[in-house]
Amino acid sequence: MAASKTKDLQIKEKQEVAAAAEQTRPEPTFVPAVDIFETDRQITLLADMPGVTAKDLNIDLRDNVLTLSGAVDAPEGKDEMDVLREYRTGRYYRQFTLSEMIDQSKIEAQLKDGVLRLTLPKVEPAAPRKIAVKAG
Amino acid sequence: MIIKRITGWPRWEWRSPFEELELMRRQMDQLVEGLRGGLAREGTAGVLPLMNVTEDADHYYVRAELPGIKTDELDISVTGTSLSLAGERTIPAEDATARYHRREREAGTFNRVISLPTQIDPAKVEARSSDGILTVVLPKAEEAKPKKIAIKTS
């Protein structure tokens, strides 16, 4: 039998985390799954945050700590009753400490189909400059 | 009261050991259910995606979290009482020079069939996707809808 090219997606439940501060709204907090990769020029972060809209997503970078947080409104209507409930919805929260110096003015964020793509460009190193010595 | 406690214990009447086990099993179930925050896990088939199913008087609503999956990559089909959802999640390849620090998002294929409690009308099923959440609205068949019976007064 030929080996299947694609593997089956494994079951992965949302990971719940205890929030640092107590919430005013009683809802669970989840850790979004992320991919982070680095090239010479930038660090890119991809995060799965289904249900988050652009206006409810907060990205904050200060003192090298990157904070992602997003609120999700329950998608169910008022008159709907549960038949089967396998996952819960709540807010997303995750923090990362960045070691590289990031050029804050060039950070870009894009949210599409519940996936956040955050581009963090590194600060360009000062170009080497040769100083010519003039003979006096 | 003391007399009752003394005479009531130990009880010498014979009880089925299975009865005791059954009671213990039920108590364990309740305990575990409490720890999980009342989330019904019995329905989980161990396959992706996880689904929430709700109903109102006329419809069933099936929701699944599918971040990064485009609607044209999904294959949704319905019969009288079942809904099948299949698709593939692909994560596009990035720059070859990229060094990964974390790789938690997974790619792969999925296929799931759920059966619904009553008949639905397959012709009127609608599916929409927004912000990575798929919602399938399945109207109940006419014969499955609750009917109000008027009482005639003679």
Image: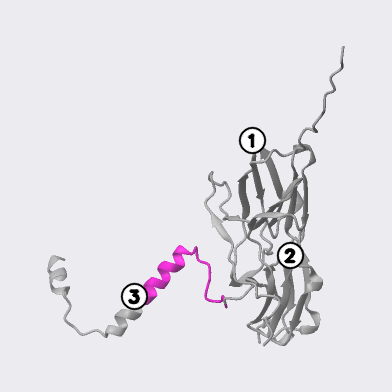
Q: Is residue A17 left or right of residue B134?
A: left
Identify residue for label 1. A63
Vertically, is B7 above or below A62? below
| Residue sitting at x 81%, y 72% | B72
Residue B30 located within the stretch drawn in magenta: yes
Number of the label disc, if any, that sits on residue B91: 2
Q: Residues within 10 Å of mark 2 (few under 14, many from 20)?
A: few
Q: Amino acid at mark 3?
A: Met
Residue A89's spot in the image, x, y percent? 62, 60
Residue at the extreme top: A136
Kindly indicate whether the residues beneath marks 1 and 3 are on one polypeptide chain: no
Instruction: Choose between B140 and A101: the one closer to the eye.
Output: A101
Chain label for disc 2: B
| Residue sitting at x 76%, y 78% | B75
Mark 1 element type: loop
Kindly indicate whether the residues beneath marks 2 and 1 are on one polypeptide chain: no
Mark 3 element type: helix
First to last magenta residue range: B24-45
Quadrant position of the C terminus of chain A in the picture: top right
Number of the label disc, if any, that sits on residue B24: 3
User: Where is residue A4, by image quadrant?
Assistant: bottom right
Please name the colour scheme applied to the rendered image: one colour
Q: Amino acid at mark 1?
A: Asp
